[in-house]
Amino acid sequence: MFSIPDISRQHKMALGFGFLAVFFANHSLSAMAIPYFQMTLGLDPFKLSLVMAGPIVFAALISQAVGEFSDRCNNIRGSRRFILMLSGVLSGLCFSLIWMVPIHWEPDEILYYLLLLNSLFCISMTFLTINVKSLAFELSHDAQQRVKVMAFGSLFERLGTLAYFWLFPIAQLSLWGGVYLGIQYVGWFIGFVLIALFAMITAWFSQIKSEGSLQHHSDKNTQLSLDETNEQQPIDTAQIDHSVKRALFLLLGLTLIKFGLISIFTSLDFYLLVYFVKAGDLAAGAAWKGILSSSFACVTLVMIPLFSYLTLMLGKLKTLYLIYWITALGAILKWFIFQPGNEWAVVVDALLGAPSWVAISVIIPSMFADLCAYERRLSGKNKVGYFISIQNKVINLGLVGAMIGAGLLLNIIGFDADLAGQQHADTITWMRVCLAGGPLLLCFVSLIIVKIYPLSEPHQTTLNAKSSYGQT
């Protein structure tokens, strides 16, 4: 499955370290900030959410400029190594400094400090994310290899999920002499080792394909396509440009649905576990949420190679169909799973939900890479950073939208934290309806998007517009 031609074991491991660096950069702050700054230091939850979300929005807005800058550096220097290494070091340094805030400061002073450091962190993290993913795109030169590269990177990301749930508990261990020192030690380790060092390893040992090499593969694939079809019809460039833009828009739609809209509804599983399944017992509900999250991570490690293999056998679009139907079934079963007495059924929820991660972390990114490669073959320009930056912008905006949308949804359905396990019956019912119905509806929307996706499988496309584009 992960035998990738033209990419040595050294370069694959370097890429894996890059995906790990990106994972911990993107997820560690959210995993540690709320339990430390809100629950331990007592900062205002609303102000803290603004300090956390604001820099993410700014990073999303500059993503496209970062992608274009990365492409220019790649064209001038012949690689992205320098910018990758620099962004990794800066990301790790900023992350480490976040946890150095003096605890004797006033709450507003701490918030200003966090706003400054988090802004610098999000900017450098944007450079790091775009350049690591650009490297993954450039290491692969055909449709099947892109699936394998994305699956390999996704496996490393999933390994990260097994650890980041425990970051704050580790900081609370007595061996540090207090949580204030513990959070600093953990923050330093994540910043200097898991982010900065891993990014440096990726930059130093990764294989960089030059523009000429990329163009060589493109010219070769183009010639093969022409030879196979024996058609010399003129290319309708206007139709091609429209189809590329439409395909990009639909892929971004699938990304926004997963990272934004579905997350709004699935965030209710924690609330149902605490306030319905465990009748307001926060510790017990949190424990079952941990079991659900860990089960999801473990199951995904199995699902990635399984559905990646299916993708190579069936094609990306057919595999996406299968995944979204499985996810729809899982959405329906949420109504029955999140009820008192059915706690262990959360494993089933993880089993049916895990394939959706393969879709968003393996198949859809490989489709972005296919689209990027095909556009490069037509225009002669390498726009890897541009394509990834647009996807990164949508992901960031989706995450912020999920944060805000989840809070608004709770208010709309009448949730009251002061009532603990005595929530109104209508509130619990609407939680269950939203948790099951929201993802179910969005799965059907995703199926429609896959149905109308305008491009055929990349290995079947040619430079002839009629045979390559316009297929639904």
Image: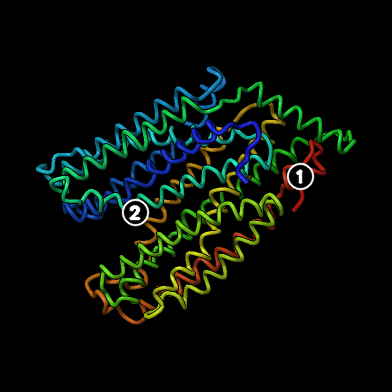
The percent position of residue 193, horizontal first and vertical second, equals 34, 35
How packed mark 2 is, by other alpha carbons closer than 10 Å (few <14, some 14-19, many 20 or more), is some
Residue at position x 34%, y 46% from top? 28
**442 vs 230: above or below:** below
Residue 104 vs residue 408, the one in the foreground:
104
Residue type marked 2: Phe
In the rendered structure, the answer to whether residue 399 lies left or right of residue 352 reads left
User: In the rendered image, which quarter is residue 85 located in?
Assistant: top left
Q: Secondary structure at mark 2?
A: loop
Q: Secondary structure at mark 1?
A: loop
**151 vs 452: above or below:** above
For disc 1, the marked residue is 469
Identify the disc placed on residue 219: none
**325 vs 371: above or below:** below
For disc 2, the marked residue is 165
User: In the rendered image, which quarter is residue 463 located in?
Assistant: top right
Residue type marked 1: Tyr
Pair 2/1: label in front: 2
Q: Is residue 135 visible?
A: no
Q: Earlier in the sequence, mark 2 or mark 1?
A: 2
In the rendered structure, the answer to whether residue 210 lies left or right of residue 181 reads right
Residue at position x 81%, y 30% from top? 223
Q: Find the distance from the CA under tag 2 to the CA under tag 1.
A: 44 Å
